[in-house]
Image (spheres, rainbow, N blue to C red):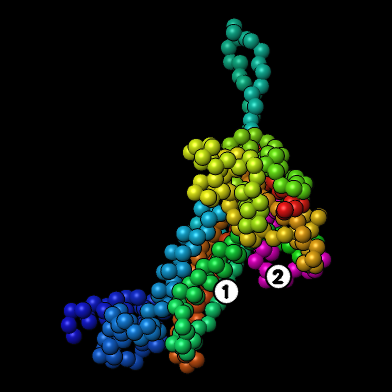
Amino acid sequence: MDKSQFFNLLNVLYSNTKMNKKSGKYELPAVMKGLTVRDMITKANESMSTTQANNGWNFAVPEQLEANIIARVTEETNLLNLIPAQNQYFNMPSAVYSIPAVGQSLRMSRMSEQADVPGAVAPIVKANTKKLTLTADKLATTVFISYELMEDAVVNFQNFVESELTRAFEVSTHNFIINGDNDAADTNINTLGAVPSQTFDFMGNPFGLRKLAIASSRVVNAGTLDVQDIRKARKFLGTKWTRPTELALVMNSDVYFQLLGLSQVETMETFGQNATIVNWVLTHIDGIQVVVREEIQNANADWKVSNTPGDNTKWQIVLVHLPSLYIGFKRVLTIEADTNTQTQQIMTTASTRLAANVNENDLPAVALIVNITLS
């Protein structure tokens, strides 16, 4: 065994050895048990240095999937990246976790002038805080890949699986935050007219952004979309609207392209470095960051997504104050991949446990622009 073979073997052993939670001991996966050192060296060389597409992949693929998917999620989950770091709890100590949040603002009280009277004290008031509760909800999905599928695929199937699992996490996380509604009746804002399945990803969050805006009637009936509709929505947020850098406009691609055509949307040629369109990309409106998410579906004229697709002919935009949005993770993202030699399949499961809540104790934090018609 030369030096390169030795390091290949070490790398494969390190990547595949995992702790048995029951015994507390580190063990090799079943696919590697019973192999001689010579066999392991051969497989390690195939996995680490061969140019043949699938040689040794049954060792390398599970670990590569885990690392690559987590890296992609970190890069691609854009709405989460906008939430202030202090509002994201990546290590919830319990499944139900309460945190203090800013409450209603204090005010001073008028006092009489008593310059010659010692011991005059100001009225005693209590600082207002609000307890926000984050309740973790579990989301998961599993993908099976057969040896034959990997061997016969004319595309890079590993890359395809990575993309799909990344997309599943990204879409479900945003559905949970944007469309969350735990109403189990046919009045759910995402399935109006039909009882939603308890397996739907939005069912675990009673504080979805659209649900909060609809429940409090903080909506702007737009019709033909105009920048003034966005400004009307900002008014619902009280003084929070005065800090546009803390706001986000969340819309799907149809509405995004409609905004591109508005006469009020300035370009670099006419508005300089503060233009809303930079390099042909719409980045901000009135200083508010634009976020394109396809989880915002078309809705009916009553602002909800009907179970009858033909009724969903209106578009929507969510306006949210990001520092008021709190996200918690009891399990950020776990990727578990294992090889079943009997069925000759790789099973990859992605799972997360997350929670969401919105602090609206002092001022509203969410508004909704509804009934948008596109030209």
**Magenta segment:** 192-212
Residue 235 in the image: above or below residue 343: above
Mark 1: give few (<14), some (14-19) or many (20+) Cα within 10 Å.
Answer: few
Q: Residue at position x 51%, y 53% from top? A: 81
The residue beneath circle 2 is 198
Residue 167 relative to residue 23: left or right: right
Residue 141 marker: 1
Residue 21 at x, y percent in the picture = 44, 76
Residue 56 at x, y percent in the picture = 35, 85
Q: In which quarter of the image is the N terminus?
A: bottom left
Q: Nearer the viewer's eye, disc 1 or disc 2?
A: 1
Residue 131 in the image: above or below residue 97: above
Instruction: Tell me which corner region of the image, top left, top right, bottom left or bottom right, holds residue 105.
Output: top right
Residue 372 at x, y percent in the picture = 74, 51
Residue 188 marker: none
Q: What residue type is labelled 1?
A: Thr
Q: Residue furthest top?
A: 116
Residue 210 on the magenta segment: yes
Local secondary structure at mark 1: strand
Viewer-closest of 79 and 29: 79
Q: Is residue 360 visible?
A: no
Residue 218 relative to residue 143: left or right: right
Q: Residue at position x 81%, y 55% from top? A: 301
Residue 254 in the image: above or below residue 364: below
Residue 103 at x, y percent in the picture = 63, 39
